[in-house]
Every structure is written in structure tokens, then in C-alpha cells.
Image (tube, rainbow, N blue to C red):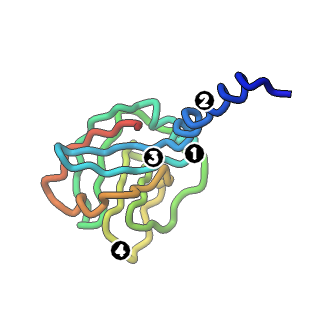
Amino acid sequence: MKSIYSALATDCISPILMHKSINQIKLSCGENVLIGKLNESKASKDLIELLPLSIKLTDLFGVKKYSLLPEYLSESGQQMHQFEVGDIAYWSPGPGIVIFYRQYKAMVDSGLYKVGRIESGIQLLRFEQFSALQIELI
């Protein structure tokens, strides 16, 4: 039987532990903020180890933003063959991070592993001035 103190302690700790398992990230460029969520893949966990991270984005084909990462991440998991607007992917040959902000019917490059998804603010990436990005765990 649980004591009232252990039940209270468990109730107090659970939201904190749950928050850490959500892997929410904030991507900011000045006053503009995007909120994303990383998945539970090994590459995502490797990415979390690099945070906070400042990167410079390059626009590719009006469809995605790309940046080199300072280190290679794990390549375990299923490679992507299609993408949706808002997907965040690790590109292993880079090593780089890719954020898809506009739909396009072409197949994706090989070596892409989905690591997460932008949940709000994806439309901000359509603007050219969105070129420097700070990524941090929230």
C-alpha cells in the first residue's frame, strides 16, 4: 500500500518526467518562434545531446530549409521515402538537418531519417530572412 507521501511525490514527479519524454523543441529566429516535437528515435536523442544549437539555414528549391550539423547522428531506424509539410529530418550524408515547409510531389533524397515535426509556425520558414535558427529543448 502506498503512503500518502509517496502518492503525492509520484504525482508531483510524473508531470516533470512526462514533459522530458515529450521532447518539445523551440526553434527561434529573433522574435519568430516555431514549436516542434522530436520523436523517440536514436537520431533524435543524438540531436537532443547537441542542444542548444545555433544553425544557419539554406533554402533548397522553395520546399525545405537545410543546415549542416556539427556532428553525425545515428542512422538507425526507417529511412524516409515521402515527407509532409512540417517534417524534421536528419540527412546522414551531410550531416544535416532538413525542415520541409512546402509540399512537393518528388521523392525525398536517400539518407533522410525523420526525427520530428514542427507543430506550430511552419509558415514562417517561407520567408527568406528566416536564415539563422536557435534550437533548444523546452
Nearest to N terminus: mark 2 or mark 1: 2
Mark 3 is on which residue type?
Ser
Q: Earlier in the sequence, mark 3 or mark 2?
A: 2
Pick whichever of labels 1 and 3 is earlier in the sequence: 1
Say which residue label 4 marks. Answer: 104
* Quarter of the rendering containing residue 118: bottom left
User: Residue under circle 1?
Assistant: 41
Task: Please give the residue where the numbered disc 2 appears in the rendered image.
Answer: 13
| Residue found at x 39% / y 77% | 105
The label nearer to you, 4 versus 2, is: 2
Give left or right: position of 7 versus 124.
right
Where disc 3 sits, the SS reads loop
On screen, 136 above or below 63?
above
The kind of residue on which mark 2 rests is Ile
Q: Residue beneath label 3, please?
A: 92
How far apart marks 3 and 2 lie (CA) works out to 36 Å
Whether tag 1 and tag 3 are in contact, CB under 8 A, the answer is: no
Q: Earlier in the sequence, mark 4 or mark 3?
A: 3
* Amino acid type, label 4: Tyr
Residues packed near mark 2 inside 10 Å, few (<14), some (14 to 19) or many (20 plus):
few
